[in-house]
Image (cartoon, rainbow, N blue to C red):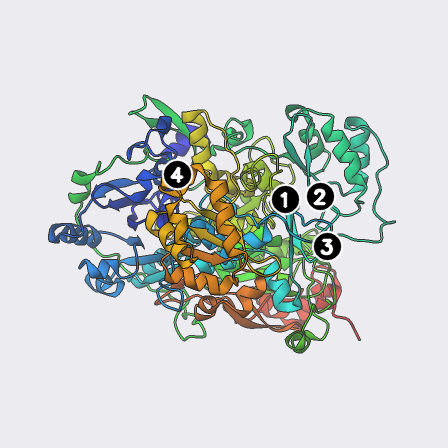
Amino acid sequence: MTTNEAEKRPGSLAGVRVVEIGDQQGEYCGLVLAGLGADVIKVEPPGGSASRRFAPFVDDVPDPERSLHFWAYNRGKRSIVLDLDTPEGVAELGSILAGADVLLDSTPLGHLETVGVGSAEQLRERNPQLITARLTPFGEDGPFKDYLASDLVHLALGGVAMNCGYDPDPRMRYETPPVAGQLGHSYAIAGEQMAFTVIAALTTRLRTGRGQHLSCAIHEAVAKNTEGDLMSWVALRTPFLRQTCRHSAPGVSRHRSIFSTKDGRWYLASTRNAKLLGPFLETWGIGGRISDGSEEQEKDSRVLPGMEGGAASNMDVVEQTIRRYMYDDVPWREAQEAGLMWVPVRKPHESADDEHWLQRGTYTEVEHPELGRSLRYPTSKWIADGSTWVSGRRAPLLDEDRSAVLSLTPRSAPVARPYAGTERLTSAGRPFPLQGLRVLDFTWMLASAGATRFLAALGADVIKVEWHKNIDPRRGGSPVGGRDAREAATGPVPSIWPADGGGPVGAQYNNKNPGKRGISLNVKHPEGLALAKRMVRESAIVAEGFSPGVMEGWGLGYDVLREINPSIIYAKQSGMGTKGVYGRYRTIGPVAQAFSGLSHMSGLPDPYPPAGWGYSYLDWYGAYSFALAILAAVYHRETTGEGQAIDASQSEVGLYLTALPLLDHQVNGREYVRAGNRSPYGTAAPEGIYRAEGDDRWIAITCETDEQWQALAKEAGHPEWLELAEFATLADRQAHRDDLDALVQSWTCEQEPFALMERLQGAGVAAGVAQTAQDRWERDPQLRHLDWLTELDATGFGRWPVAAPSVKLSDTPQHIGGLVGRGAPFYAEHNHEVYGEVLGLSPDEVDALIAEGVIARPEDGPQWPTS
C-alpha cells in the first residue's frame, strides 16, 4: 500500500470526540487517542497549560508557543482557552462536553466540582453517553490520595527505580543510587493503559448506549510495571538486585550485556549460544575460545529461547572484538543475520533516519509554518491495513481553535446495539466490557501474551494455543511447599524449578496469563492445521508473537485467515515488525530498549555507562501497546464491519516515547545527555534519589518551587540552608545542583525513609521511598486500598495473587480472572472443554485426535514433581 493510500484511510477512532483537561499526567493518553484518529480538544486555562512552560524551547528561549515538550505531547490536538473561574468559562465547557464522547481529566481532585463544572456523576447525568476518564497520582480516595508526586517520585514509589541502576561493588554494597528512566514514563505507563481501556469503554457503549467512569491511579499502574521482582517476592520471598543495563535478579550475574567500542559508544550483545557465536567471531571477531558453558559451576538465572549454551568467559572475546571497532563499523547486522541478538545502544535521535523505520512509516514530517520548516516525529507504533495512525497537525497555538470548537454542536446519542447472546458477568455480578469476543491466542512471552491477558480481563474468551515442543517459557517460580511454605517463610523459599525452567504453572507465567483457557494443537499436522482453521472461523481475533513468517509457514497467514473469516482481526507483534529491512532480526525487551534509545537515556552522566532498564520494560509496555492495537481494531470493526491485519513492533513502542529528544536534536542541534535522576530538561532543584537510613534504602524528592525548597529546609531543621546565596533562587539551585544534592543527602541518610516520606508529604513536598517488591506487597497502604492484586486459583499451582487491571470501570468492571475466574492454565488444561464447546467435538473425538498426535495431553507438557 502506498503512502498516499495510507493517508486516505481513517484512524480507528475517527468520529470520536475527546475533551482533555488537566496537566501533563493526561497529555500522553490524549496524544495516543489523537494518533488513533480521535478529535482531541485540549482545554487550557488563561495563559496556557503548564506544559507550555516546560523546557526545552526553540533556541532555548522560553516561550509558551515554542516549548518542544508541549509540541511532543500535544501534536494532533486542538486548543481552546476557558477561564473556569468565571461562569462564562464553565458554561462554555459544559457546552463542549455536551457533544463529547470522552472527558480525559487529570485536574486536581475536586477541581471541576469546586469551579462548578460538576463531578463525573453529574456530568454523566447531563450527558449519559459521556465516558469520563480520570488520571490521578494516587487514586480518587485512600491514604495517599492527597500526596504530591512527580515522574521521579512515581518511578521510585512504584518500584521501577529499585530494579534499575548499576552493579554493586564486590562487597555487594551499592555506592550509586537506583536510577529512574527518563522522560515521563510514569505518565506513559498509565496513559497507555487508560487509552486502551477508553477504547474498551467506547466499544461497550456501542452495546449499551451509555458511558461510564474510568479511574486510573498512576501509582498503581507503575507499581505493576516491573517484571520479575514482584512475583519473585510474592511466591518465593526472594528479593532482586539491580545490575548494569540488564535484568535485576536474585543474584548479581557475571554475564554483562553492553560493551564499549573504540570511540566510547556502546553495543548490547548476547554472548550466549556458542553454536552461533563461534562461527560468527571466526569471521568478524578476533578469534578466541568460545564455550557452551557446560564446564561452569555458576549458572545465570536468566536464560531465554535462543540464548542457551554460553559461558561467561565468552564475554571477554566479545568485548575484545567490539573494542577493536568504531561504533559505526561494528558488524551488528551481520550478527543478527547469524542469529545473534546484537544491536547498537542508540541515542534517541539516531533511528529517525533508519531505512527500516522509514519503510514502516514510523516517523512523519509535520509542518511547522511558524518555523518555516517541517520536523520529524515518531507517529506510529504499528501498521494496519484497515486503519492508520494519524500524524495530525503540529501542536496547537494557544486558543487557536476557539471559534471552531465553540461552533461544535451536540450530537445525537449513539443507538445501542444490545448483545444478542447471554451477557457474561464478573464476580461482582456486572457485565464484562467485552461480550462475545473470542481470541485464538498464539502469543508467548510477555510482550504479546501480556496483551491477551488484558483482553481476558475485559471479558474476551482467550484460548491459549500451545504445542509442548515449543512451549511458552518462564513457567517456573513455584515454591517448594506451596503457599503454606511461603506464608511461613522468613527467608527465600526454594523454587521447584528455576524461573526460566519449566513447570506447568509458576508465579511469573501465572501473572502473565490469567483468565485464559489453554489447549494444545499441533498445527504442523494436517489435521491440526484443519482444526486451527475451524477455530479461526469461530474466532474474532487471532493474535501471535512469533518471528515474522512463522504463521505463514504453517499455512495460517492473513490471506488464509481472511479467506476463512473475512472479518478476522489478525494481530502479530515481533521485535522489529514484519515490514522493513529488519523483519527477521531478533529481539527481546533489552534489545528493543537499546535499539530504540531508551537504554541510552537512563543512567548517570558520562563517564558512567548507560544504566538502561533493569527489566524488559518494553515487554510490559509492548503488551499495553499491543492490547491498544487490538482493541482499536475491534472498535473499528464494530463501527465499519471491517477486520484488519496488524503488524506491530516492540521497538517502535520505544521509539514513540522519544519525540522530545528527537525534536531537541532537530531544532537545537543537541544530543540527549544522561542526567541521572534529574530530568534533563526540568528545573526542579533539589531533585534526585537520596540515600536514607538502612541498607540500600533511598528516597526520591522533587522540589519544583521556592516554597517547596523552603518547606524541605524547615522540615530538615536546617533553616540556615535558606540563607546560603548559592541556593537563594531556583536558578541558583539549578546552577549548584551537585552541592545541593550533597547537602540534602547529608540529612536524608540519617532518616528512616518511610517516616521521612510522610513528613515531607505533610510539609507539601513531593517525596516517595524507592520501594522494593517487598515494600509494595507488604507495606504500601495505598496499593492495598486500590486492590492492586487479585487472588486467583490456578490448577495445581494453588491460590496466588496476580496483578489486577490498573483502570477501574464503574459500570462494566474488569476482572483479571476473565470469564474462567482463574489464574493461568496449565498445558492443554481445557482441551475437551474448548474443542467440545467451540467445535462440537465429542470427548471420544478429542481422545482420538490425541492418539493421532494432533492434540497432546496435559501430561505431555511440563509436569509437577511426583514426590
Amino acid at the residue labelled 3: Ser
Residue 16 rendering spot, x and y as whole percentages: 30, 48
First in residue order: circle 4 vs circle 3? 3
Amino acid at the residue labelled 2: Arg
The span from disc 4 to disc 3 (Cα, nearest Å) is 47 Å
Which disc is residue 256 wearing?
A: 2
Residue depth check, mark 4 versus mark 3: number of the one nearer the observer: 4
Give SS at disc 1: loop
The span from disc 1 to disc 3 (Cα, nearest Å) is 15 Å
Give SS at disc 3: loop
Residue 603 rendering spot, x and y as whole percentages: 57, 42
First in residue order: circle 4 vs circle 2? 2
Residue 720 rendering spot, x and y as whole percentages: 40, 50
| Quadrant of residue 193 within the rendered picture | bottom left
Residue depth check, mark 3 versus mark 2: number of the one nearer the observer: 2
Q: Furthest residue to the top? A: 372
For residue 452, above or below residue 819? above
- Which residue corresponds to mark 4? 732
The span from disc 1 to disc 4 (Cα, nearest Å) is 33 Å
Which disc is residue 301 wearing?
A: 3
First in residue order: circle 3 vs circle 2? 2
